[in-house]
């Protein structure tokens, strides 16, 4: 019970101390007290970052860049797997199209047999008209169902091809960004070595402005690294690369457009007679 009372007393003292501290800040700075606290916090944080050795920040940046490698390898593996799936889906679509064409030919043959009355379709077996119609109905329903499935597979193929193209662009951008970042780090490290050499060769009146600039540059390495990596990811993810549309041979696109939208009105020909 005493421990609980003692703990409660300490909590109350802490709350009271915080309230008194806040009250003192308000009395000293008025409504600007939060701004003073925020400025002091940022100053302490910036001083702590400035105290970190430049070489340590360079090594840390190199580790950040190296951490991109597993993501690139995973992306390559996913890209290859998706590529194989797209190829298999393309072959499946081609096979479905061939089967539908065969089924269409069979249905036309059945339809002609009903028209001509020749119902001996295979060997010496003769079928009745009702049997042929029943078989034709079954084939037609199956043909329509498979045709819808084919349309869905073709839509899926287009979506996968578009995603694959975006993934390829993203991989290329990430690899390019990684090389650029490594080159930038090498340049910063070479600059630091030069500054350190100049610093060690001087005995008096050392101008540390170049070193201060190097420290300021390196302190922002992590932020630039994150921004560049995320930009590379977002550009690949939202790139608007489409799949080219290939017109099938023999397809009359103009006639299809006229049937769908209506043929344009013909302009009256001018009278050439004098």
Image (tube, rainbow, N blue to C red):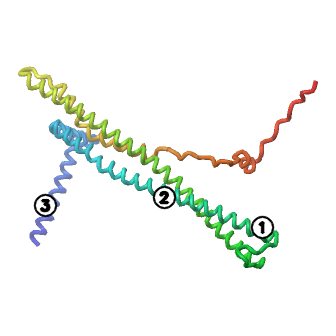
Q: Residue furthest top?
A: 205
Q: Which mark is residue 112?
A: 1
Residue 166 at x, y = what percent? Answer: 45, 47
Return the residue nearer the eye: 182 or 47. Answer: 182
Mark toward the start of the polypeptide (1 vs 2): 2
Q: CA distance from mark 2 to mark 3?
A: 71 Å
What residue would you read off at disc 3?
10
Q: Residues within 10 Å of mark 2 (few under 14, many from 20)?
A: few
What residue would you read off at disc 2?
88
**Local SS, label 3:** helix
Residue 224 at x, y = what percent? Answer: 30, 38
* Occupied quadrant, residue 269: top right
Establish if 118 lies above or below 85: below
Q: Answer left or right for 267 relative to 7.
A: right
Return the residue nearer the eye: 78 or 8. Answer: 78
Mark 3 vs mark 1, foreground winner is 1
């Amino acid at each position: 019970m005493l421990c609980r009372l003692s703990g409660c007393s300490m909590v109350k003292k802490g709350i009271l101390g915080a309230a008194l501290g806040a009250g003192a800040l308000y009395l000293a700075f008025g409504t600007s007290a939060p701004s003073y606290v925020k400025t002091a916090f940022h100053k302490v944080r910036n001083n702590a970052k400035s105290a970190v050795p430049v070489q340590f920040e360079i090594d840390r940046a190199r580790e950040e860049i190296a951490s991109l490698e597993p993501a690139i390898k995973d992306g390559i593996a996913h890209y290859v797997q998706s590529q194989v799936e797209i190829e298999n889906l393309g072959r499946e679509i081609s096979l479905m199209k061939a089967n539908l064409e065969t089924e269409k030919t069979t249905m036309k043959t059945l339809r002609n047999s009903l028209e001509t009355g020749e119902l001996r379709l295979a060997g010496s077996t003769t079928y009745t008209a009702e049997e042929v119609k029943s078989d034709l109905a079954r084939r037609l329903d199956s043909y329509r169902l498979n045709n819808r499935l084919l349309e869905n597979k073709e839509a899926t193929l287009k979506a996968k091809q578009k995603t694959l193209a975006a993934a390829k662009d993203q991989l290329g951008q990430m690899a390019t960004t990684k090389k650029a970042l490594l080159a930038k780090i090498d340049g910063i490290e070479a600059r630091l070595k030069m500054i350190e050499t100049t610093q060690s060769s001087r005995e008096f009146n050392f101008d540390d402005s170049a070193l201060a600039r190097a420290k300021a540059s390196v302190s922002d390495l992590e932020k630039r690294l994150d921004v560049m990596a995320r930009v590379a990811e977002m550009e690949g993810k939202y790139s608007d690369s489409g799949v080219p549309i290939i017109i099938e041979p023999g397809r009359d696109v103009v006639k299809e457009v006229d049937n769908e939208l209506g043929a344009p009105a013909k302009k009256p020909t001018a009278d050439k007679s004098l």
